[in-house]
Image (cartoon, rainbow, N blue to C red):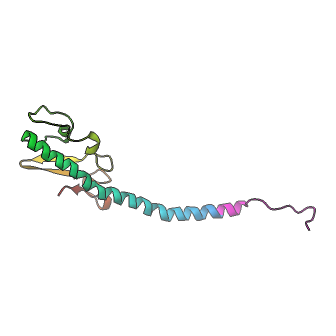
Amino acid sequence: MRRKNETKRKGFTLVELLVVIVILAMLSGIVAPKFFAQIEKARWDSCRSKMAPIESSIETFLLNTNYYPGTLNELVEDPGLNGWAGPYLKASQLLDPWDNPYIYNPYSGGYELISYGADGVQGGTLYDEDIYND
């Protein structure tokens, strides 16, 4: 039987809430970096596969006009060359997984297609490493 002054305890004390918050913060500090690392790895892995349609469009452009495009924008907008049968790509396809434009370097008899990775700056390591078409 309850005494008159006793009340039923409801809710949590401030100390209990603080302990739970500290535990959740520690867990998120461990899990969050691993989760975000997986996202960057997926973007890095998809970068090269996103280059394939660009390479295919460059080759189609070459077949149609007998020239390599001067810029990647020529795959989207008519440069005024005879035989141009584009657009070959959407403008959004010219961006890497980090929404940076792919770097296109045409040279005599070929071209180089590059993504500067997660940081968007030339050079780097891990997910900031430059990705080249093979």
Where 41 falls versus 104 (above or below)?
A: below
Where 75 falls versus 52 (above or below)?
A: above
**Nearest the camera: 36 or 125?**
36
Q: Is residue 68 visible?
A: no
Question: Could you tell whether 79 is left or right of 44 in the image?
Answer: left
**Picture quarter containing residue 44?**
bottom left
**Nearest the camera: 79 or 103?**
79
| Range shown magenta | 1-18
Q: Write the residue at 32% across / 46% down.
A: 99
Give the image location of residue 2, x and y in percent: 91, 66
Q: Write the residue at 9% across / 44% down.
A: 63
Give the image location of residue 104, x and y in percent: 18, 46
Question: Could you tell whether 133 is left or right of 6 in the image?
Answer: left
Q: How many marks?
A: 0
Q: Write the residue at 10% across / 40% down.
A: 64
**Picture quarter containing residue 8?**
bottom right
| Image quadrant occupied by the N terminus | bottom right
Q: Write the residue at 13% across / 47% down.
A: 59
| Image quadrant occupied by the C terminus | bottom left
